[in-house]
Amino acid sequence: MNFGGRPHGASTIRCKYCRSSLTVIPGERAIQCSQCNCVTRVRRADRIPLPPMGPMTAPFLHARSKKRAVLIGITYASGMRRGCGELRGPINDVKCMRNLLCNRFGFPSECVIMLTDDQRDPFRLPTKDNIRMAMHWLVQGCSYGDSLVFHFSGIGAQVADDDGDEVDGYDEALCPMDAFQRGPILDDEINEAIVRPLVRGVRLHAVVDACYSATVLDLPFLCRVSKNGYWRWEDHRPKTGAWKGTSGGHAVLISGYSDGNKNFAVMPEAVASVGAMTHSFVRAVECEPYGVTYGRLLNSMRTIMHKGGGGGYDDLQGPIGAPIMGNHQVANFSGVQEPNLSSSEMFDIYRKPFVL
């Protein structure tokens, strides 16, 4: 990548919303505007083919075990969110998730990859290229009995769908730390990268703490709470017939419903915060017994959110606080209002045990 000027082979388009000039890198399908923060999709006619990828040399690509995880936390401290301040929860979210996976579920520490924007190692920064490499590492060579975890804490985005595979007409996306230069990672790419390669006997659990993230893995079935308080499945398979499932494995996304209108929380310097979605998940897992059902886990998360962990700030106590020192508070930077579950297949959430 060329940081000294316009990257080689780049083109220029106009922001759909504020008409600012945007530089598009070859191979990208969307770009985020640095002026208005909105995402503009790159038309097919304007897309430049991505040159062939060279060998991936990230050091973590050599670590392998039956339990692997990629944990991503981005504060956007470099000023991506102009006028809004940086997020003060994502890095602590990653620490809490790592503590949970290693201490409760036996994930080897060398196979839990953390990408955060406070790291000095360039391969551990949550850039778009590094996130792509980490997703590739997570599922590469997966086989029967593998348990995989993908966690993202940061900013999400929406962009108008152009291929008819979204029920609501919008693709969802995750924003890497270089989203203004490289664009967000669309749900189509995430699905292709870490869902479709899953073979029989492989489990993937994703936990995403970001706005506009309810179906960010593009999984075909969504389970959310109905007005009568019961969890209900919805069929989100594309009308186009496009396949969004796995190659025989099972993928589950635990995320949150958000209408995108809630203000982001900016924490004082002296406060160490965690995201409301991550907090409710980790707290629920810590408090519930081994083998708890998905339904009970979701209900526990919902209770934690409604008691304070899902809005404003709340004191953080108990096992979740172990990796964080000092004053602990919960910041609802993703605007999450209810937990959601989406899956590559429908199942009885009140009977099936949650297992990592």
Image (spheres, helix red, strand yellow):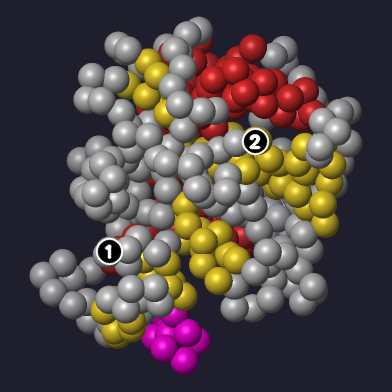
Quarter holding the C terminus is top right
The amino acid pointed to by label 1 is Ser
Cα–Cα span, label 1 and label 2: 30 Å
Q: Nearer the viewer, residue 129 or 144?
A: 129
Residue 328 is left or right of residue 170, and the answer is left
- Residue 300 point in image, percent of width and height: 69, 21
Query: Is residue 68 depicted above or below 286 in this figure?
Result: below
- Residue 128 point in image, percent of width and height: 37, 59
Query: Is residue 164 depicted above or below 11 in this figure?
Result: above
Q: Secondary structure at mark 1?
A: loop
Q: Residues within 10 Å of mark 1 (few under 14, many from 20)?
A: some
The amino acid pointed to by label 2 is Glu
In the image, which disc is placed on residue 34? 1
Observer able to see residue 197: no
Task: State the residue at coordinates (67%, 21%).
Answer: 303
- The residue that label 2 is drawn on is 338
Extreme residue toward the top, this view: 318
Give the residues in magenta: 42-50
Tell me the quarter of the picture where residue 235 sits. bottom right
Observer able to see residue 296: yes
Q: Nearer the viewer, residue 311 or 320?
A: 311
Residue 91 is left or right of residue 238, and the answer is left
Q: Secondary structure of the magenta portion, mostly?
A: loop
How many numbered discs sit on the rendered protein? 2
Q: Nearer the viewer, residue 106 or 310?
A: 310
Task: State the residue at coordinates (53%, 22%).
Answer: 309
Extreme residue toward the left, this view: 4
Going from N to C along the chain, the mark reached first, 1 or 2, is 1
